[in-house]
Image (cartoon, rainbow, N blue to C red):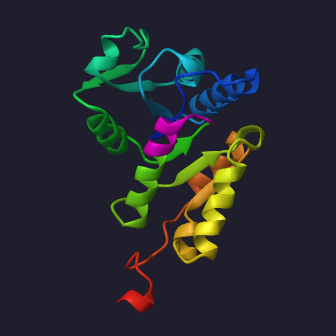
Amino acid sequence: MKKLAVFCGSKDGATPIFHQAAATLGTALARHDLGLVYGGSRVGTMGAVADAVLAANGQAIGVLPHFLQEKEIAHPNLTELHLVESMHDRKAKMAELAAGFIILPGGPGTMEEFFEVFTWAQLGLHEKPCGILNIDGYYDPLVTLFQQMETQGFLIPEHAAMLLVESDPERLLERFRTYTAPRVKTYMNKKQT
């Protein structure tokens, strides 16, 4: 792995723990010589993770749609900034550049980005790890929802096992290093084939 995409918020969240967690992840990425691919913003936890990577002499690559650059939220000190036409182009570029995907606490945009790349993994469009950095139990309800999907037959066990969840960035990065995508021929169950 050379670079990991991190999906996170344009806000800091209700408590300082989320901002600090983003900075801790950024420092860990740089320490392990993993470049950051992210949304290109200087605000919220996005800015915190990028600032920490850069402060630790790491590589921070932003991908930002033109319309957001015009709102003056682009991080001014990135290693690289890719300007794209749309949010769809942003996700495609991030997926192209990254060898895996992590979500930090965030809002609907963070969820949408993560669910898209996780779905692509289910469909076999990539074999990259997808992980949740579950800070202060933020994603406990989402983890429970994934368990419900599996219990109710909407997510097969092989695909459920693709979701990597940790509360510590070092443990999550170690699981990324040892990740092997499951060999699943189809996303449908046997009754549907």
Residue 181, relative to residue 166: is it above or below? below
In the rendered image, residue 112 lying in the magenta stretch gets the answer yes
The residue shown at (71%, 23%) is 14
Q: Residue 131 at x, y = what percent?
A: 58, 50
Whether residue 127 appears in this view of the structure is: no
Q: Residue 92 at x, y = what percent?
A: 30, 42
Using the image as rendered, state which of residue 53 and residue 114 is in the foreground.
Answer: 114
Quarter of the rendering containing residue 13: top right
Using the image as rendered, state which of residue 182 and residue 42 is in the foreground.
Answer: 42
In the rendered image, residue 169 lying in the magenta stretch gets the answer no
Q: Residue 6 at x, y = what percent?
A: 51, 36
> In the figure, is residue 188 to the left or right of 21?
left
> In the figure, is residue 22 to the left or right of 140?
left
Q: Which residues are magenta?
A: 105-113
**Majority secondary structure of the magenta segment?**
helix
Using the image as rendered, state which of residue 23 and residue 157 is in the foreground.
Answer: 157
> In the figure, is residue 3 to the left or right of 55?
left
The residue shown at (46%, 56%) is 118
